Each structure stands twice: as C-alpha cells, then as structure tokens.
Amino acid sequence: QVQLVESGGGLVQAGGSLRLSCAVSGRTKSSYAMGWFRQAPGKEREFVAAISWNGDNTSYADYVKDRFTISRDKAKNTVFLQKNNLEPEDKAVYFCAADLVPLRTSVTSRGYDYWGQGTQVTVSS
C-alpha cells in the first residue's frame, strides 16, 4: 500500500506563491511517476502537472505553464509543486497522485493508482 500526504496549501493573495509538497510512504522501494491534480468547487478534477520517476519527463496543463513547476526529491520520497503568480482561478483542492508506470506522465486521473487527501489553496483578489 502507498500513502500520499499533501501539505503547503493555504491562503495567498493574487500574484503570490505557494509550494505544495507530497510525501510518499509505504511501498517506497517501488518507482512511481507522480502527478498533481486540482478540483475547484462544482468542477471536475483536472490535471495540473506530472513528473516521471527519474525526473526527465514533465507535463503541464496549458493554464499553468510558466507559472507552476513540478519537481521531486527521490531521496526524501517527496514531490513538490511550486506555484508562482497565483490567480483567483487557481483556488481549488490540490491532490497528488502516484502512477505505477514510472516513466509515464499521464494527464488523466485514470492513469494514477494512489491518491492523497488533498490540500486547499485559496487565492484572494
């Protein structure tokens, strides 16, 4: 079993920054690609960013390119999402997810096998 725990959410003003973290525990000897998704109230869960196990491949949703950066620290089994120039539209619950196909950067939620509980991000205008 794999557990994912997100942290780093909170309230920030528009134009500000936040860094989300996702700590992976459990079957940490396995190799995972990791992704971030978000879900705003009344909306479907949507893809934000993904990174392969070795960090060589990344994918981003168009609306976060040049503002968000995904990275990982394999030694600490942690994945990060650095979010800059936040907009009110970025308000959502952010979820991290693990994919057992290590070199894939899936943009759909169906590609992921494990999910965290989410962390709330609120952006004030």
Image: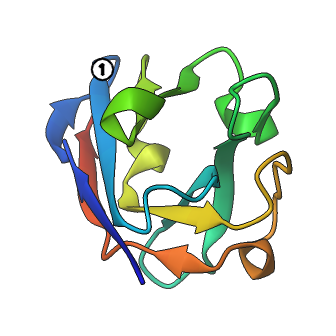
Q: Can you give x and y, in whole percent of width and height, for residue 31 in the image?
A: 63, 52
Q: Can you give x and y, in whole percent of width and height, for residue 79 in the image?
A: 43, 39
Residue 22 vertical position relative to residue 67 in the rendered view, above or below: below
Residue 122 vertical position relative to residue 18 in the rendered view, above or below: below
Residue found 63% across the figure and 80% down from its top: 113
Look at the numbered disc 1 and give the secondary structure of its residue: loop
State which quarter of the image contains the N terminus.
bottom left
Residue found 42% across the figure and 26% down from its top: 83
Image quadrant of residue 124? top left
Q: Can you give x and y, in whole percent of width and height, for residue 34 in the image?
A: 60, 51
Residue 118 vertical position relative to residue 113 in the rendered view, above or below: above
State which quarter of the image contains the C terminus.
top left
Is residue 96 rendered to the left or right of residue 77? right
- Crowd tier of the residue under label 1, counting other residues whose Cα lies within 10 Å: few below 14, some 14–19, many 20 or above: some
Q: Please, what is the three-letter code of the amino acid marked with disc 1?
A: Ser
Image quadrant of residue 106? bottom right
Residue found 80% across the figure and 69% down from its top: 108
Is residue 91 rendered to the left or right of residue 74? left
Is residue 97 rendered to the left or right of residue 116? right
Q: Which residue is mark 1?
A: 17
